[in-house]
Amino acid sequence: MAIVGMTIAPRAVLSRSVLALLLFAVCAAAAEEAAARREYGASAPDAVKESLAARVSAFYEFFQAGKFRDAEALVTEESRDVYYNITKIRIFGFDIKSLEFAEDFKFARVAVTCKMPVPMMGLKSLDVPINSEWHWRNGDWFMHFGPRRSPDGSIQTPFGPMKGAANTGAASSGGPFPPAGARPTLDSLANMFRADRTQLRMSGSEPGEQSISIENRVAGPLDLKVRGSLPPGVRVVLPERIAAGGSGKVRFVYTPGEEPLQGRHTVELTVRPIEQVLKVSIDF
């Protein structure tokens, strides 16, 4: 998560509005959990990309204008109750980062960064990443929400269980969020996980394997995803979801090709749902 335009104290407590959008992000990404085995990455025709980008833009433009009821029309019918019960707040703006499609082009995964106003930063904003799944229904794209709820109605987040408020304005004062002293800080966002090492060494001319261990230091589950392209001959084996307080092993497997790798290469891993990036260097 990046700070735009200024630096603030690492222990600064996140505002209710930022927590509301984090909660929204968790619910939007939860649909991916139900379709965790669905493969994304298919190359879509330009017309398909443009149609999805237009719908995504329309959805977040409604959030920018505070027209949350209008945005509901772009949500799948079966998940509108979830959408309605999520606390919704206005955003300064947004950027579409990536569009990934299933092979049949009926499902897509979208990464967007929303610019959030943060009271303690004046007119500056905080970039909050949101991942969501979109379904092709009746000739158009719709965002799909998958609730990740406990029996008491709370939603599991990286910071522990949180409850959404059924309103269309700012976060309510009626209990969806923990008190200020218990809220996550910018420091906790940067330290939600720990890698035992980030530098590896392998022979460029021989097959090899190295691994690192990722420790989950927060109250909710974390997922890992490879970000960007991999160096030639390098394969990354990711662990299953890392439970709160647990750890997972990431394996880096190298098979040399006709031209062995030389020098330093970097592999980037995204930690979800908060989109923190872990960079691992491999020296050959």
Image (cartoon, rainbow, N blue to C red):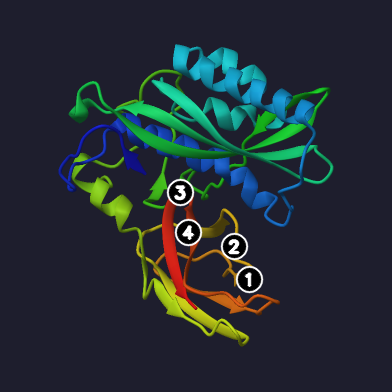
Residue drawn at point x = 36 percent, y = 59 percent:
218
Total numbered circles? 4
Q: Which residue is mark 4?
A: 221
The residue type indicated by label 2 comes to Leu
- Measure the alpha-carbon separation of dots 1 and 3: 21 Å
- Measure the alpha-carbon separation of dots 2 and 3: 18 Å
Left or right of 261 on screen, residue 24: left
Specify whether residue 185 is in view. no
Q: Secondary structure at mark 4?
A: loop
Q: Which residue is mark 3?
A: 275
The label on residue 235 is: 1
- Measure the alpha-carbon separation of dots 4 and 1: 24 Å
Q: Return the residue nearer the eye: 179 or 36.
A: 36
Tell which circle, 1 or 3, labels the residue nearer the N-terminal end: 1
The residue type indicated by label 1 comes to Arg
Vertical placement of residue 242 versus 135, above or below: below
- Measure the alpha-carbon separation of dots 2 and 1: 7 Å
